[in-house]
Amino acid sequence: MSNEQILLPMLGMMVLTAVVWFVLYAKRIPAMRRAGKPTQAYTTPDKGAAFLPEEVSYPANNLRNLFELPVLFYALCLYLYVTSSAGSADVIAAWLFLVFRIVHSAIHCTVNIVIMRFAAYSAAALALWFMLGRAVWGAL
């Protein structure tokens, strides 16, 4: 397995982030039009939430979440690539991280069932912690 393969799941995370961004605006703009309030009424998330149905904010909440643990994922993938230390287990774990983050985002942006979302989030986090542990162990 080549070292470059660690970059593909990273690219997948970037695509996921872009998809969630588009979903956010595909839901938010029509909801804002239906609410009939001037755009200046939406200066903060709290103000916007007062005018829009709760489910309209799900993608925005998920987008914010995509800049939490995934930031560590990006840095870790780049570290593994730069140090040429990405092994097969890292690449598999990176793909698992991506798959579980896709599941997490799909749940978060639609039905938002917390226990399902938490299970997907936890599985992704475990894949990430596995990768981090291997990187730290390899650096020792």
Image: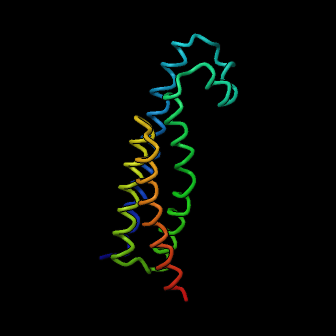
In percent of the image, x 41 and y 64: which residue is there? 7
Residue 95 horizontal side relative to residue 83, left or right = left
In this view, the residue farthest toward the left is: 1
Residue 115 is situated, as x and y percent measured from the top left of the image, at: 44, 47
In percent of the image, x 52 and y 22: which residue is there? 53
Figure quadrant of the N terminus: bottom left
Residue 85 is situated, as x and y percent measured from the top left of the image, at: 44, 80
Residue 131 is situated, as x and y percent measured from the top left of the image, at: 45, 72
In this view, the residue farthest toward the top is: 36
- In the rendered view, would you say 56 is above or below 122? above
Residue 84 is situated, as x and y percent measured from the top left of the image, at: 44, 80
In percent of the image, x 47 and y 68: which residue is there? 77
In percent of the image, x 51 and y 69: which residue is there? 76
- In the rendered view, would you say 70 is above or below 136? above
Report which quarter residue 26 is drawn in. Answer: top left
Figure quadrant of the C terminus: bottom right
Task: Give whichever of 103, 86 is nearer the camera.
Answer: 103
- In the rendered view, would you say 113 is above or below 8? above
